[in-house]
Amino acid sequence: MKKLLIIGVTIIMFFFKSSSNANYEKNFYDFKINSISGDVIDLNDFKGKPVLVVNTASYCGFTKQYADMQKLWERYRNKGLVVLGIPSNSFNQEKKNNNEVKEFCEVNFSINFPITEITDVKGNNAHEIYKWAKENYGKSAVPKWNFYKILINKEGTIEDTYASLTNPTSKKITKKIESLLD
C-alpha cells in the first residue's frame, strides 16, 4: 500500500509540475532600439552573444557604474559580450536630451559600448524590450531603479537579473558572463 501511495504521488507531481522556464514567443534578438545618435540598433546583430542590458541615468548615485560597464566591455567584448546602456528618465534622474547624455558618457567615462536613446524602462510607455522581459521573466525583470541589470544569454532569453547595488564587475556577474562565454 505504501509503495502504491508513493507511485501515485510521483505521478501526480509529474502532471502538476510547473516549469520555471518561460515560454518565449520572441527573444531579445527580435527587437530594435534607437541608438543615442539616432541610428537603429538591430539586436539581431548581437545574435548568439550574451548581452548585459543596463538602464542608466546621469544624475544617479550609481552613475559611477558607467566606468565599470566600460571595463566589463573592454574585458569581454572580444570574447563576445555586448554591454548595452539604456539611458532612462523613468526615475527622473536623466539629462534632458540624447546629445547631453552622449557627451556626458564620452567626456566623463570614455564610453564606447552601444548606448541607446533615452528610453522608458517601466510602466505603460516602457520600450518593447522591457515589456518582453516582464512578460517572460516576471516582475524581477522590471528595473527597480537606475543601473538595474538584465543578462541575456546566447539564446536571446533572460539568464538573470541584478539589482542596482550589484556592480557590473562583481564576481556574481562576471562568473555568470564567463559561464555564458564558454
Image (spheres, grey):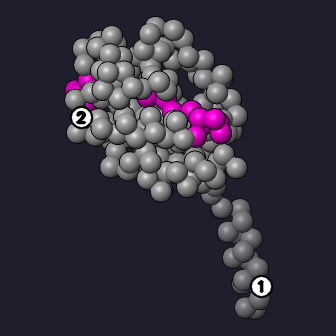
The alpha-carbon separation of the residues under discs 2 and 1 comes to 60 Å
Q: Is residue 56 magenta?
A: no
N-term-proximal mark, 2 vs 1: 1
Q: Which residues are magenta?
A: 76-94
Q: Is residue 29 left or right of residue 109?
A: right
Q: Classify 10 Å Cα crowding around label 2: few (below 14), some (14-19), many (20 and above).
A: some
Q: Which mark is residue 60?
A: 2
Q: Secondary structure at mark 2?
A: loop
Residue 90 visible to the viewer? no
Q: Secondary structure at mark 1?
A: helix
Residue 18 to residue 177: above or below: below
Name the kind of residue labelled 1 in the image. Answer: Leu
Residue 134: image x %, image y %? 47, 37
Residue 47: image x %, image y %? 68, 29
Q: Are marks 2 and 1 in contact (CB under 8 Å)?
A: no
Q: Which residue is mark 1?
A: 4
